[in-house]
Image: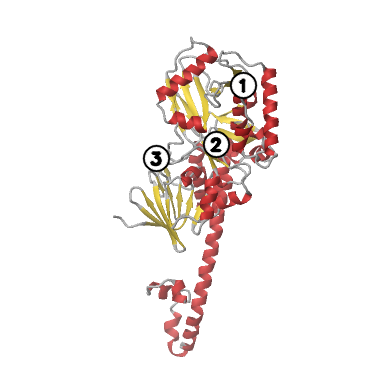
Amino acid sequence: MDSPTRCSVIIVGAGASGISAAKVLAENGVTDLVILEASDRIGGRVRKENFGGVSVELGAGWIAGVGGKEPNPVWELASKSGLRTCFSDYSNARYNIYDRSGKIVPSSIAADSYKKAVDSAIRKLNTQDGAFSSITETSSPKSPIELAIDFILHDFEMAEVEPISTYLDYGDREFLVADERGYEFLLYKLAETFLFTSEGEIADPRLKLNKVVRELQHSRNGVTVTAEDGCVYEANYVILSVSIGVLQSDLISFRPPLPRWKTEAIEKCDVIVYTKIFLKFPHKFWPCGPGQEFFIYAHERRGYYTFWQHMENAYPGSNILVVTLTNGESKRVEAQSNQETLKEAMEVLRDMFGPNIPNAIDILVPRWWSNRFQRGSYSNYPIVSSYQDVQYVKAPVGRVFFTGEHTSENFSGFVHGGYLTAGIDTSKALLEEIRKENKRESDSQAFLLEPLLALTGSLALTQTDSVSTLHKCDIPTQLFLSSNVGLSEAIL
């Protein structure tokens, strides 16, 4: 077996937080780093795929929080890169609710039901047990319309109930990425600032793809990371930029195990599964006028193919519909075949638009929950979570640092949370720790040097020439290199 690869910092995961953390480290002189990515690409949960002749976003698809008092850093990156986007207005969805007979629910009834649902949710939040999970369970929507509105409210528009920092700080506008280069293009542009590229491809040996980390050994002396293929990497520090779902799984084993306060905080964070199913048709049969980009299907089962979007605004003439499922429905659909999912989706569409609509000619079903490198779409802290829970999730354990959108106190669940307050903040914290360690080592060397300098001073009259050829900072280094003990042991 080859000898371990040695570097200063290992970064596990090349998503938004991992890439941004590596960029900050490199800009501050820590270029001796290695990025280990489990898949064959960078981007993490930012991923595009060609479908129906256009580029669709399987994971993160919107830049949320635009037009406010502060500039969203991801929006700034997108603007600088010329990323093509389209404005999305979710608010119209509540007025485009179809029942199973294909009739649109009158707007007055929809508006009244929506207002009642918002008022109910706010009352729940004002109680001691107002957790996110309890809202959907105790507000007791019963009719298909109530269930549909409950789904819209809690799975898409929670900002109308609970103030969300993204919208308060950056603005309430959202833009769908509609660029053939994909949302991930922004991450490639970031990577290009510190990784070597050739003919538009990242060719830097410090980025290692298809490296599935399975074990992380850590001590006060350093870290050792072992990949599934047997490759071993050693470093002074590691930044773990994996999802909260992966942390909750058994993909990576820690030696020694993480402390109880850490694992308990990790388990408290919810993992949201958000599945966008894409359907390609020979021609469009749905309304495409103003305010009709999103429409809702009211069914007796909450979240059953409820939230629909056409892609005509993003890609005119694409003839693509997207239906979004979450959590339990997402996991159910992931476990069945695409043909079964297509059959269910077509039955729903025929309820809304009649039996004579054409069959879909293609379907794309992402499987974020089944993907062992992701285990979900994004994190969600229950509303009753304490400030301490979030701090514990992002707190380092010795030389192991944690980053990702789940470590962002204000922006968890968003790309800008992974990029800004996770990746950048984590790398700054590590840089400060490196500075402190360097100072401790310098102080230790000075402590060891004092008696040696005193000794050389007493011999100065007879050994001046021999001592003067040896720089004083080389003395402890030479003693360390010629001995079998470390500096700390030598001092003792």
First-in-chain label (3 vs 1):
3
Which image quadrant for residue 288?
Answer: top right
x 52%, y 65%: residue: 438
Please identify, in this view, whether the residue under mark 3 or under mark 1 is nearer the observer.
1
Above or below residue 282? Residue 142 is below
Q: Amino acid at mark 3?
A: Asp
Q: Which residue is mark 2?
A: 81
- Judged by depth in the image, the label closer to the viewer, 1 or 2, is 1
126, 417: nearer the viewer: 126
Q: CA distance from mark 1 to mark 2?
A: 42 Å
Q: Is residue 392 above or below residue 438?
A: above
Looking at numbered disc 1 in the image, what kind of residue is underneath it?
Ile
Task: Label 2, secondary structure: give it.
Answer: helix
Q: Amino acid at mark 2?
A: Ser
Residue beneath disc 1: 145
Q: Residues within 10 Å of mark 3 (few under 14, many from 20)?
A: few
- Identify the residue under disc 3: 40
Q: Is residue 42 left or right of residue 178?
A: left
